[in-house]
Amino acid sequence: MTGKIIAIVNQKGGVGKTTTAINLAASLALSGEKILLVDMDSQGNSTSGLGIARQELDRSLYDVMSGDCGVKDALAVTAIEKLFVLPSSIDLLGAEVELAGKEGREKILLTAIAEAKKEFRYIFIDCPPSLGVLTLNALVAAETVLVPVQCEYYALEGLGLLTRTLSLIRGSFNPDIDIEGILLTMFDTRNSLAHQVVAEIRKHFGDKVYETIIPRNVALSEAPSHGKPALLYDIKSRGAQSYLSLAKEILNENSLRQGA
């Protein structure tokens, strides 16, 4: 088995990247796949959102990227048997500066998680909302990107920016990187603009846009403060059910691609 590395990325903040990282990883793990979530954001919301106390960590992603330990030494377990996290710590803030002058700085994560591909079916990277050294590492390591897009006015602008970024990455570092899928998030059925945005994005990106749409949902907002993915907080909620549906869609699409 060789795992697939998917970066969850959008240079625009507040679009549901971390919510997607936590809940998609949890949903796939619940389906029986062994999943690794790499928390690349120094805010560490994917780490704390899965109930991991950052201040109690002996090792983190920072130690892996600094070369002080391997991925296996830094893994944190979660309440879901097959879901593991490579946690973030506040030290990641310094990593941007420390890595800036380092030779081959953009390939540090790629090298570090190469071994993990043999053990995990999917490796998701929760990226920061900026294009610094950490996001660059994620885009160099990843085979594809999953792009959460909020159903609001500036959505297409953010997608345009990301498309240009991916062109640059292809030209300089990772020629094969592709879009895994575009995920419409924070959808409010009562908002006519949200419906227009959905139609516009589907028109521009066609079958790259997932059928599953993630609604605005109380359970998705509340679950992280309890250190749980939505499916452990309230599995019947629309939020939890939508991520379970997305997980099925991703598994189906990937098995079709492998069969092609």
Image: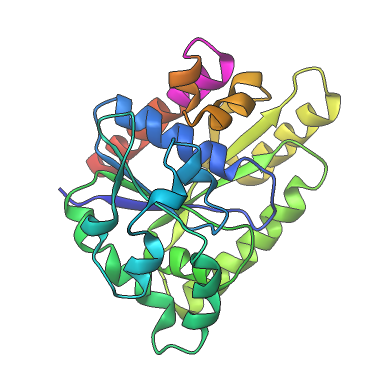
Up the image or down, 195 lies above or below 12; here it is above
Q: Position of residue 82 (x, y in %)?
A: 25, 34
Up the image or down, 211 lies above or below 13; here it is above
Q: Is residue 201 magenta?
A: no
Using residue 60 as the reference point, say whether residue 93 is left or right of it: right
Prevailing secondary structure of the magenta residues: helix
Q: Between residues 231 and 185, which one lies in front from this camera angle?
A: 231
Q: Which contiguous range is marked in magenta?
A: 235-245
Q: Between residues 67 and 247, which one lies in front from this camera angle?
A: 67
| Rendered image coloring scheme | rainbow
Q: Position of residue 28 (x, y in %)?
A: 34, 31
Q: Position of residue 21 (x, y in %)?
A: 48, 41
Q: Is residue 239 magenta?
A: yes
Using residue 80 as the reference point, say whether residue 43 is left or right of it: right
The quarter of the rendered structure image containing the C terminus is top left
Residue 35, by quadrant, is: top left
Q: Position of residue 259 (x, y in %)?
A: 23, 39
**Residue sitting at 71 percent across and 54 percent down?**
158
- For this orientation, the residue located farthest to the front is 56
**Residue sitting at 28 percent across and 73 percent down?**
68
Residue 166, by quadrant, is: bottom right
